[in-house]
Image (spheres, helix red, strand yellow):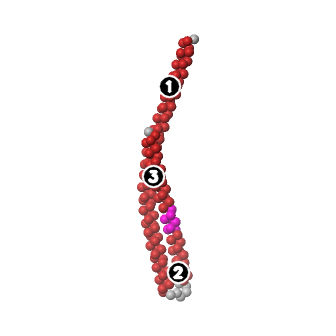
Amino acid sequence: LASVLSVRESMERREELALTKIQLEMARVQHEVEKVTAELAEAQRIREESMRHPIPAAQLQAMLHAADDATARKKKLIESLAALERQRGEQMRAYQTARRARQVLSDLRAQHLEAWELEQARAQQKILDDIFASRNQRS
């Protein structure tokens, strides 16, 4: 039972590590989304400020092109975040399954250990009772 429990604990740890890895990747992608959003806001502010003064059309086109690129990057990041969210859900279910399987074995092992300890205590008490009874018979 101990070896099976060890395997189950290992499986649980592996699933937990995979879940942690996905969560870290989600945090990284979320940070990138926030960074691109800030870039877009700054680009919008600069573009609006630039529009108050005459600027060359090429410069305006470059600004618009950069904003379009940033928007496309943000869209890809959001799609990636959605895919990671789905993976996280699947991994969470796998982790919970592994955890339940390990918990069942842990509980079973604890029950067996408790029963064994009780049996040992009874056997020890029987030995003491036999010793006491044999001494009483000699007296």
Evaluate if marks 2 and 3 touch, with contact meaning CB atoms under 8 Å apart: no
What span is in magenta? 27-34
Residue at figure coordinates x 53%, y 88% from the top left: 54
Query: Which of 117 and 30 lies nearest the eye of the viewer?
Result: 117
Q: Is residue 104 left or right of residue 50?
A: left
| Image coordinates for residue 74, horizontal then vertical, percent | 47, 70
Q: Amino acid at mark 2?
A: Arg
Q: Is residue 127 above or below residue 23?
A: above
Residue at figure coordinates x 54%, y 16% from the top left: 133
Q: Is residue 70 magenta?
A: no
Q: Which residue is mark 2?
A: 47
**Magenta span: helix, strand or loop, mainly?**
helix
Q: Secondary structure at mark 1?
A: helix
Q: Which residue is mark 3?
A: 15
Q: CA distance from mark 2 to mark 3?
A: 48 Å
Q: CA distance from mark 3 to mark 1?
A: 42 Å
Q: For the residues carrying marks 2 and 3, which lies nearer the camera in this image?
A: 3
Q: Quadrant of the N terminus?
A: top left
Ranked by sequence position, the earlier of labels 1 and 2 is 2
Q: Is residue 36 above or below residue 87?
A: below
Q: CA distance from mark 1 to mark 2?
A: 87 Å
Ranked by sequence position, the earlier of labels 2 and 3 is 3
Q: Which residue is mark 1?
A: 123
